[in-house]
Image (spheres, grey):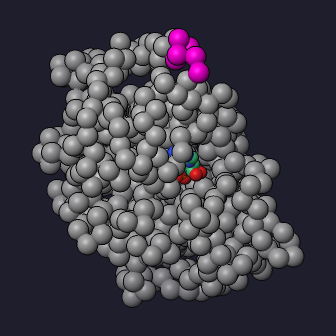
Amino acid sequence: MTSGRVNPQFRLEDQGIEGLGNVYYNYMEPALIQEALKRDEGTLGNGGAFLVTTGKFTGRSPKDKHVVKTDSVIDTIWWENNAAMSPEGFDALHADMLEHMKGKDYFVQDLVGGADPAHAINVRMVTELAWHGLFIRTMLRRPDREDLNDFVSDFTVINCPSFQADPAKHDCRSETVIAMNFDKKMILIGGTEYAGENKKSVFTLLNYLLPEKGIMPMHCSANHATGNPVDAAVFFGLSGTGKTTLSADPARTLIGDDEHGWSDRGTFNFEGGCYAKTINLNAEAEPEIYATTSKFGTVIENMVFDPETKELDFDDDSLTANMRCAYPLEYISNASSSAMGGHPKNIIMLTCDAFGVLPPIARLTPAQAMYHFLSGFTSKVAGTERGVTEPEPTFSTCFGAPFMPRRPEAYGNLLREKIAQHGATCWLVNTGWTGGAYGIGSRMPIKATRALLTAALDGSLVEAEFRKDSNFGFDVPVSMAGVPEVLLDPRRTWDDQAAYDRQAEKLVQMFSENFQQYLPYIDDDVKAAAIG
Ligand SMILES: Nc1ncnc2c1ncn2[C@@H]1O[C@H](COP(=O)(O)OP(=O)(O)O)[C@@H](O)[C@H]1O
Ligand SMILES: C=C(OP(=O)(O)O)C(=O)O
Ligand SMILES: [Mn+2]
């Protein structure tokens, strides 16, 4: 049996996917929730939210992500960062997955990645779980119902959590697999229920496709001054650094919380929804995000709740610290309906410094911005990747290495050209530790980060007095209304200032060692901005 709305010329059979049980094409939210409940995939929460747990996998499995080594991509993929899979391994995986799918029900969502129609791609998501259908429908962009009648996908993603890969046969690392085949225009996901893999696969795909069109794909959130889309800002950052939290600013209009493109026309969201962390989510501090957790269709992943009242426990991280809610952009009252904005006037690079060395904000020259973008210094935050249980310092180039199929310079050079062309002001913002390293100090108060960002974005911060940081060479404001002055000078926040100096020296050394790999690829001005 098949039901729902689909292009009659582009059914699963037309893609060689046959022998399934029931196929549900483009079911809308209430119908997906009904099917998910029927299958006991989760439970209904307050306001019609849908609550699920994902078992063993509650974060991404970056080591299980593979790119298929076909001739057409052999010279463009950054193989040091992307595990290869042989075409033969992929074909075996594909065949075995299709066999495994036989007789089982599947959900198909025909969706769009990219809010700017000029640069959008059609993505068909085929999911074993009804709630994965609901998740990805929430997260990507939903075409008009009528447009489904002639929808043909550019790429197809099949997500089958009950499938277990065989490393010997499928040329992968474990039973969990995310395999991207750019020639066959297909992504196969197996052995994990963590919903984030769905959206980050599409992101990785766009990160591959868009640079060829001169579009800079960015792991960033974005917003603009309310009433003035031309005054846009982007916030780069690896998972857990504050993209979602800091872009939801009541004083500004939200463009998106995680993945954007920068074209000749300005910034555009790839997605139509947000995916926020709910750990310690607080109604006073984050009222808008908090409110989405009791709205219809919000997908709530791995949160502990009271079975009688369905009340959520925001402090209980016993399932994972990476508990999440996924909701459509419209659930944030000041979200942009077009999900587009102008060329970024300000570029923020968020870093979660677990060493407590970096200042809460620093102004970067364009060369320093390029240096920090390529370096991507930050921490992996607990729960976001399998095996990470406490903040783990890392250099994640482009602030999103796990999602970058091309070499870092491909993205770095595009960003650099665009910064030069549009005269963006760049900032490095530490949302990590202050008053000592992780274990001694504390996380930067969100209030201070917000106050500094507000001043950066409204133009008042550039007027402040700055000091040149002797370790890192960037400009740090000396004082700012609403922010305790001591906070601006991390050395003074430490009890033991000699210990600060030692830690800073160590970090400078780490930057310098990490950057060696980029020296052959960069210009002299960026070399001059290098640290150490
Ligand atoms: N100074 C700060 N700035 C931003 N986030 C902070 C700060 N201090 C603590 N946090 C917490 O860190 C987490 C940031 O996560 P999130 O905004 O989801 O990051 P991302 O979207 O980049 O993955 C949130 O749980 C937030 O409450
Ligand atoms: C969905 C994710 O992204 P982020 O934490 O950057 O929002 C993830 O890393 O799994
Ligand atoms: Mn986020």
Q: Nearer the viewer, residue 25 or 298?
A: 298
365 horizontally vs 502: left or right: left
Decide: is 149 above or below 101: below
Determine the residue positioned at 86% across, 72% down.
Answer: 307
Determine the residue positioned at 15% across, 45% down.
Answer: 423
- Residue 250, how many percent across, how many down? 42, 67
- Residue 386, how many percent across, how many down? 67, 40
Residue 65 lies in quadrant: top right
Determine the residue positioned at 53% across, 80% down.
Answer: 26
Residue 38 lies in quadrant: bottom right
494 horizontally vs 185: left or right: right
Q: Quadrant of the C terminus?
A: top left
Residue 367 lies in quadrant: top left
Asked if residue 136 shows in the view, the reply is no
- Residue 308, how many percent across, how many down? 87, 76
Q: Nearer the viewer, residue 119 or 44?
A: 44
User: What secondary structure characterizes most of the magenta part?
Assistant: helix
Asked if residue 316 shows in the view, the reply is yes
Q: Which residues are magenta?
A: 495-500
Q: Nearer the viewer, residue 420 or 290?
A: 290
Within the magenta stretch, is there residue 260?
Answer: no
295 horizontally vs 341: left or right: right
Determine the residue positioned at 26% across, 72% down.
Answer: 227
Q: Quadrant of the N terminus?
A: bottom right
